[in-house]
Image (cartoon, rainbow, N blue to C red):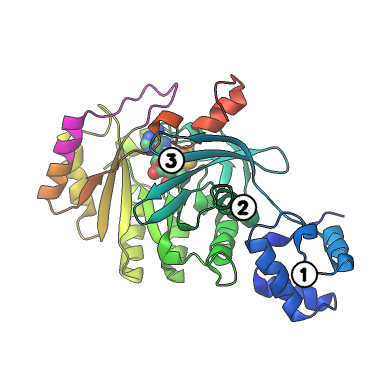
Amino acid sequence: MKKTDIKSLTLQELTEAFLQDGQPRYRAAQVYRWLHRGATEFSQMSDLSKELREQLSQKYEIAWAEIEVKRVSKDGTIKYLFRFSDGEYVESVLMKYHHGYSICISTQVGCKMGCTFCATGQSGFRRNLTASEILSQVQAASLDEDVRISNIVLMGMGEPLDNYENVLRFLELVSSPEGMNIGMRHISLSTCGLVDKIYDLADRRLQLTLSVSLHAPNDKIRTSTMPVNRKWNVEDLLRACKYYTDTTGRRISFEYAMIHGVNDSDKCAEELAGRLRGILAHVNLIPVNDVTGTGYQKSGIDRQRKFVSILDSKGITATVRRTLGSDIEASCGQLRGQRKGGNGSYES
Ligand code: SAH
Ligand code: SF4
């Protein structure tokens, strides 16, 4: 019999399961606290009887993210390659900011979306992560560095809205007061634009920050770099974004990776400003990260400045994002790509 993934259960679900097994309600709360403090074995739950621990380990399994590789950048950014029980890998990046620690985590092993500039997209899709596996990345990094993590970004490998149920469950777990208690206001979710899910998310009125990977001002360019644009084009996407900001009152952060000669002309900046008019938006410009085999180059510093100034002059606020950890290949998919290739060029 397959064991139940206990850490993906909400406190309410765990309580119901315990009551059904004739256990008192407070036992469920006790176990939930252990799980959310990062216990990896029932034997660690020292305030439970030996019989109960044995019983639980027959019925349930506890997901965990084992550290396979850890790299520390000169700027203090830490990149983890985590391994799950079935031998699949994902990456997470822990960053220290003046306001505390922030972690960028993965939601899938690989990704189906196939964006041409993205290392994860190029490596294909393996599987969804469970809610407990998404949570385990936050726990494992926090325990490893012995720090409290205050911010989470769902911007690692995978498309969070393509693993929607598990991601929603993760959000509920990580924000629960009896769990890590990281409030929605401290969580950002980045999507390549799954429009049906953006409407659904808006209607849930969660307090999280939505980032939308736009990367192009029109369908011609966007379809050439992001296949998802064939299903929902720029107009569909921006209509959903407008609905999101109108419904939630929350600003959307638009991600725009600047690729030399592809999407970084003055005309692109003007078109982008025109399209974002009327949407509560901020534009995050990121010089595209070099991914082997894509042939893309980042826009030069002068181009970046000019692009910002055009957006600015049209009333759209934009910033060029500072890149952390560039010496440890901190951008998504790069480390796992090396591991898969088995060229052994990484170090623990
Ligand atoms: N799938 C989601 C979240 C994970 S990707 C999404 O696409 O939004 C996280 C961010 O990294 C996205 O904004 C994505 O477009 C960006 N990204 C991917 N490859 C990149 C590269 N080579 N350079 C710069 N940004 C990149
Ligand atoms: Fe997937 Fe995001 Fe990479 Fe596109 S950019 S392939 S959606 S992870």
User: Residue, x 23% and y 53% (percent of image)?
Assistant: 276
Tell me the element at label 1: loop
Residue 280 visible (yes or no): yes
Tell me the quadrant of the picture where the C terminus can be found.
top right
- Residue 24 in percent (x, y) is at 79, 80
Q: CA distance from mark 2 to mark 3?
A: 19 Å
The residue that disc 2 covers is: 136
Residue 230 showing in the rendered view: no
Bounds of the magenta span? 289-307
Mark 2 C-beta to ligand 1 under 8 Å: no
Report ligand 1 position as a quadrant.
top left
Number of numbered discs overlaid on the protein picture: 3
Report the quarter where the N terminus lies.
bottom right
Residue closest to the eye, 341 or 99: 99
Judge depth for marks 2 and 3 and give the one in front.
Answer: 3
Q: Quadrant of residue 151?
A: bottom left
**Residue nearest the observer in this picture, 223 or 39:** 39
Residue 216 image point, x, y percent: 30, 40
Q: Tell me the element at label 2.
A: helix
**Residue 18 image position (x, y, % from top left):** 79, 74
CA–CA distance between discs 2 and 1?
22 Å
Q: Residue furthest right?
A: 51
Residue at point 70% right, 37% down? 87
Residue under label 1, please give it: 47
What's the residue type where badge 3 is placed? Thr
Q: Is residue 116 left or right of residue 220?
A: right
**Tag 3–tag 1 contact (CB < 8 Å):** no
